[in-house]
Amino acid sequence: MNVLDELSQVSILQVAQDLGLEVNRNRMVCPFHDENTPSLVLYPHTNSFYCFGCAKTGNSITLYAEIRQLSVKDTIQTMAREYLGGYENNAYHASKKPVVTKNTLQVVDVRKMQEKEKPVEEIHSQIYEAFRDYCLQQPSNQHSQSALAYLKQRGFTDKTIQDFRLFTVKDYSTASWYLKQRFSSLDLQESGLFNDKNNLIFYAHPLIIPYYRKGRIIYLQGRVIGPPPEGHGRYQFLYKHPLTLFNADVLEKIKLDQDVYVTEGAFDCIRLVQDGKAAVSLGTANVFKKEWAKLFKRANVIFYLDNDKAGHRAADELEKIFSHFGLTCSRKQLPDDYKDVNDYYTGRLGSNEQLGLF
C-alpha cells in the first residue's frame, strides 16, 4: 500500500478534530462558505465529506489540504509525518521521480501476477476509482468552481451532483502523474483513460461523469465546461472503449411496466432522474447494442432523444429493435425550440440562478 492509500484511510473525524474543527454528530459548519447552520457532513465509513450548502466534497486529505492551505505534495508529507508511523520523507521524494523503463516493467510484472486473481474489468475499475479519488483530493480551484457553477446553471441541484458523484479534474498534470505512479502504462492505455501516446485523455474535458454498475465505476465520460474550444467536441469518451449504458442499475429496480426514459446524453438522463423519473442514457444516438434490449424487459420504454436528425433517426431504429424483441416502447418529442431534454427543462424551469437557488 502506498502513502496516499494509507492516508486516505486516516479517520476523517480524527483529522477534523486535529484541525480544530467543531464536529457534532458528524456534522459541522462548513469552512468553505459562509453559513450559520451546519451543512457539511462527515462520512466516517468512507473518510469523506460533502457540504449540502456549497457542494464541496473530498476526503480526509482534501480537508487537511484545504484548511491548512497546503499543496498536494506538502499535504502528503505533513500528514504522513503526523499519522503514519515510521514514515520517511525521502521515500516520498523517491516515488516522485519520473517513471523509467525498469520501474514500468516492475509494475507490469506485479500486474501480471495479479491477473490470475483479478479480471481486466476489475483492474480498470480500480484505475477509474483511483482517478476519481485523487481528483477529489485535489484542492478546489477555478476549474472546480467553474464546473460547479456550470452544473447549477444547467439546473442541477447539489443533491443531484452528489448522487451521481460528478467530479472535476482540478489539476491535469498531477492527476496524470499520480496514475502513472500507481499503474503500468499498459493498464492505463487498456483502460481507455490514456491514449496511445500515454496522455490522460481528459485534458480539455475536466468535468467527469462516472458510469456505475453495482457500486463500481465501469466507464468515464468527460465534458468541457461551457462551450467547447475550437477543435474539441463537447464530450470525451474513453479511448478505444465501447460505450455502455449510463445509470443502467435503475433497470434492476423498476417495477413491471414502469416508464423508463431513454436519452442520448447523460445530462439529459440525470435531469429526468432529478425530476423523479427512471431514465438511462445511451451516450450517443449512434450506439445501441442489441443485447441491451433484454435489460428493458420489465419496462415501458419511452425514447426521449435529441431534437435533431440523428435523434429522430435513432428513435426510428430503436423502435424497430425493441419491437423485434417484443418490448413495449414509444417516443416523446421535444418542442421545436429545444435541442435536448436538459435544454428543455432548463428553458422551462430555469437554472438554479434564475430560481434563486444559486
Image (cartoon, rainbow, N blue to C red):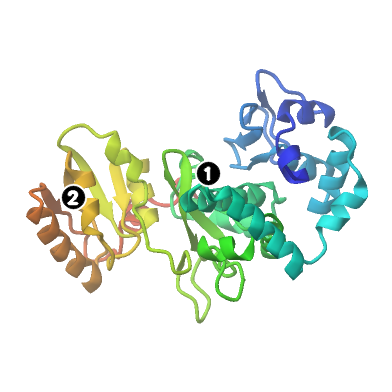
Residue occupying the point 17% across, 38% down: 298
Q: Is residue 279 visible?
A: yes
Query: Where is mark 2, residue-wise?
Result: 302
Q: Residue 338 shows which numbered tag?
A: none
Q: Residue furthest bottom?
A: 231
Residue type for callout 2:
Ile
Residue occupying the point 13% across, 59% down: 321
For disc 1, the neighbor class at 10 Å (few under 14, some 14 to 19, many from 20) is few
Q: Is residue 210 visible?
A: no
Q: Position of residue 177 (x, y in %)?
A: 71, 62
Indicate the quadrant where residue 346 lies: bottom left
Question: Circle 1 — which element?
Answer: loop
Q: Position of residue 127 (x, y in %)?
A: 58, 53
Query: On screen, 260 above or below 184?
Result: above
Q: Nearer the viewer, residue 354 or 95?
A: 95
Marks 1 and 2 close (CB-CB < 8 Å): no
Q: Nearer the viewer, residue 347 or 318?
A: 318
